[in-house]
Image (cartoon, grey):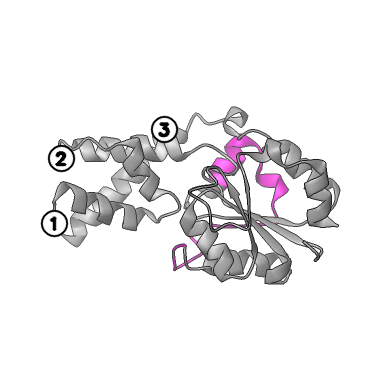
Amino acid sequence: MNKKIKGFIFDLDGVLVDTAKYHYLAWKKFASMFNYDFTEEENEEFKGVSRKRCLDILLAKVGVEATQEQIDQWLIQKNEDYLNYISSMDASEVLPGVKAFLDILKANQIPMAVGSASKNAIPILEKVGLLSYFVEVVDGNKVSKAKPDPEVFLLAAQSLGVANDQTVVFEDAIAGIQAANAAQMISIGIGDAQVLSEAAYNFENFNQITNEIITELIG
């Protein structure tokens, strides 16, 4: 890395906090209405994907055609179930090494943003005590195109006032890595390196990002 990085963008679910399990429980509850046993493996397909697209995929799995009215109602219902699950979230849900990493960036006055498909990003960040770290939260309420379209990251970089090629994106989903790459940003995969093989760099979690690597990133 030969260029000084000036901005950092983080996906939310699976990168900063562990909310994937709550999405899974909400979709599993929905699928059970059709006597369909929705598995954790199938939930992997839903990472970084919009709620509407997830519903489309699940309805195809259960073989159900729905009216627009039913779809709208089911999207609301799934979100209400999810909100019930996350209502008791606290700082213990922050993933390993995240807070220490954010503290280092903050101490070095590196601007940070969140770029997430979640429409609940702000309340989640508030509950877990991370909201104050971020200049901007670009969430599902602010974008019209889902990852792998780079819109969410382009808007986030704009809000930080940094050039795309001086921006790092942390992602746990292949669609997010593809979005970061499409935006010509430096993509860092958090999680399974085989799944996230298109990322420029991979780490199992933030504890693996050493001080040397941080120094190399921020100059």
Q: Which residue does the image show at 60% across and 39% down from the upper left?
A: 204
- The earlier-in-sequence mark between 2 and 1 is 2
Q: Amino acid at mark 3?
A: Tyr
Q: Which residue does the image show at 25% across and 40% down from the upper left?
A: 30
**Residue matched to label 1:** 65
Choose mark 3 or mark 1, whichever is in front. Answer: 1
Residue 180 located within the stretch drawn in magenta: no
Residue 135 located within the stretch drawn in magenta: yes
Q: Position of residue 214 (x, y in %)?
A: 79, 48
Q: Element under label 3?
A: helix
CA–CA distance in space, label 3 to label 1: 27 Å
Q: Position of residue 42 (x, y in %)?
A: 32, 43
Report the span colored magenta.
122-147
In this rendering, position of residue 73 left or right of residue 85 = left
Q: Amino acid at mark 2?
A: Phe
CA–CA distance in space, label 2 to label 3: 21 Å
Relative vertical location of residue 6 with respect to residue 42 in this rendering, above or below: below
CA–CA distance in space, label 2 to label 1: 12 Å
Q: Which mark is residue 34?
A: 2
In this rendering, position of residue 146 left or right of residue 5 = left
Q: Amino acid at mark 1?
A: Glu
Q: Quadrant of the N terminus?
A: bottom right
Q: Position of residue 86 (x, y in %)?
A: 46, 35
In this rendering, position of residue 150 left or right of residue 61 = right
Relative vertical location of residue 156 with respect to residue 19 in this rendering, above or below: below
Q: Element under label 2?
A: loop
**Residue matched to label 3:** 85
Q: Quadrant of the C terminus?
A: bottom right
In this rendering, position of residue 158 left or right of residue 177 = right
